[in-house]
Amino acid sequence: MTDLLLKNVRVSRADAVDVLVRAGHIARIGPGIDAAADALVEDGGGALLLPGLIEGHTHLDKTNWESPWYVNEVGSALTDRIDNERAWRASTGHDAASHARALALAFLREGTTRIRSHVDVDTDAGLRHLHGVHAIRDELASRVEIQTVAFPQSGLLIRPGTAELLDQALAQGADVLGGLDPSAIDRDPAKSLDVLFGLADRHGKPVDIHLHEPGELGAFTLDLILDRVAALGMQGKVVISHAFCLGGVDARRLDGLLGRLAALDTAVLTTAPPSRPVPAVRACRQAGVTIFGGNDGIRDTWTPYGSPDMLARAMMIGLRNDLRRDDEVDWAFDCVTGAAARACGFADYGLTPGARADLVLVDASCVAEAVVTRKPRRLVVAGGAIVARNGQDAIA
Ligand SMILES: [Zn+2]
């Protein structure tokens, strides 16, 4: 791979610099870098340089991306949506791999170079979806890094045989073990969590649990989760996705939970939905809790919404959390960049020498303007290669 020299780009409001990319990684950042004679030189035109964006929580296997519109007539209960999706998959023969591929490439065009995708594992689908997403993970590995979470969308204890499938999923290369509402869905949270954490411990894999449970019910479950994080020494290895309960308990209870999350280095994922109580970005940051962002599903049987543009998700996080000052909008941006990398364990990340060269250029004066205006990405570099220009693919 020849060197790539990106000239005349800015990191926030600072003076223009050049970025030298060698063998897929950032070799140098600074003013006036000279390139080797055979290097590919690209003029950044003074655009803002961002690190590759991160989708911290989506479901690539569920999406209808690049398919005809799905007419949503689904009931409002969580179990309605779960049952509807299983029936829809069975009747349509939904091909997780092709849809996952289309959406992953759409993410890449918008500058997202790392994705954590939960993937359904259940007694109807078995590991079919996981195999499909793993094929895409392998095919696109040089451009976009996809982490898979083996996710028991239909419940763990309530569907016998699921724990065994999760065990196989981890043995076959799923990166993370997922979970779902141990109290509300499995109705036996201590046993459910013992099975889940037992599997994670045996395979040495991180855990990422969907916790939709509201108020004190969710807080109760969260304490049970944190007990197991402490007992197994899984600090830095566990994510609580959604954690709506953190938006629905009183201040004293919230302080206690945030204190435990911080002490046990357990991160929180938010999609910042307007329709639910949510963990507050400001409170999490003040308590030292890593909070990061994602879409959840995009254009699937659960929701018509979502977008592969992570700057759009950052803006939603900013709006939902009343982040107005530039330095506060930077927190929303951190949710789809640095904080997401820390929480998910994406290595070699950032705008520093040695990091993987995942670079995004956008016409904006600063990060806050980039988040608010969300212009087409002028240039996307992934793993050291130019992959998109002005929102269009730049590779075959
Ligand atoms: Zn989800």
Image (cartoon, rainbow, N blue to C red):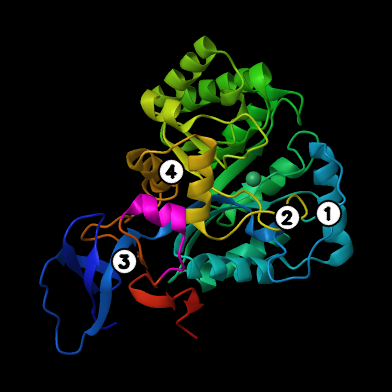
Of marks 4 and 3, which one's residue comes earlier in the chain? 4
Do tag 3 and tag 2 residues touch (Cβ < 8 Å)? no
Do tag 4 and tag 3 residues touch (Cβ < 8 Å)? no
**Residue 357 visible in image:** yes
Alpha carbon distance from label 2 to label 1: 8 Å
Q: Which residues are magenta?
A: 366-377
Do tag 3 and tag 1 residues touch (Cβ < 8 Å)? no
Whole-percent x, y for residue 196 in the image: 62, 34
Mark 3 vs mark 2: in front: 2
Alpha carbon distance from label 4 to label 3: 22 Å
Circle 4 residue:
332
Of marks 3 and 1, which one's residue comes earlier in the chain? 1
Circle 1 residue:
72
Q: Is residue 263 above or below residue 10?
A: above
User: Amino acid under label 2?
Assistant: Pro
Q: Give the number of the disc on residue 304.
A: 2
Do tag 1 and tag 4 residues touch (Cβ < 8 Å)? no
The part of the image, by quadrant, that contains residue 359 is bottom left
Circle 3 residue:
357
Q: Is residue 369 above or below residue 342?
A: below
Residue at position x 23%, y 55% in the image: 13
Number of other residues with Cα within 10 Å of mark 3, as a class: few under 14, some 14 to 19, many 20 or more: many
Of marks 3 and 2, which one's residue comes earlier in the chain? 2
Circle 2 SS class: loop
User: Amino acid under label 3?
Assistant: Ala
**Residue 28 visible in image:** no
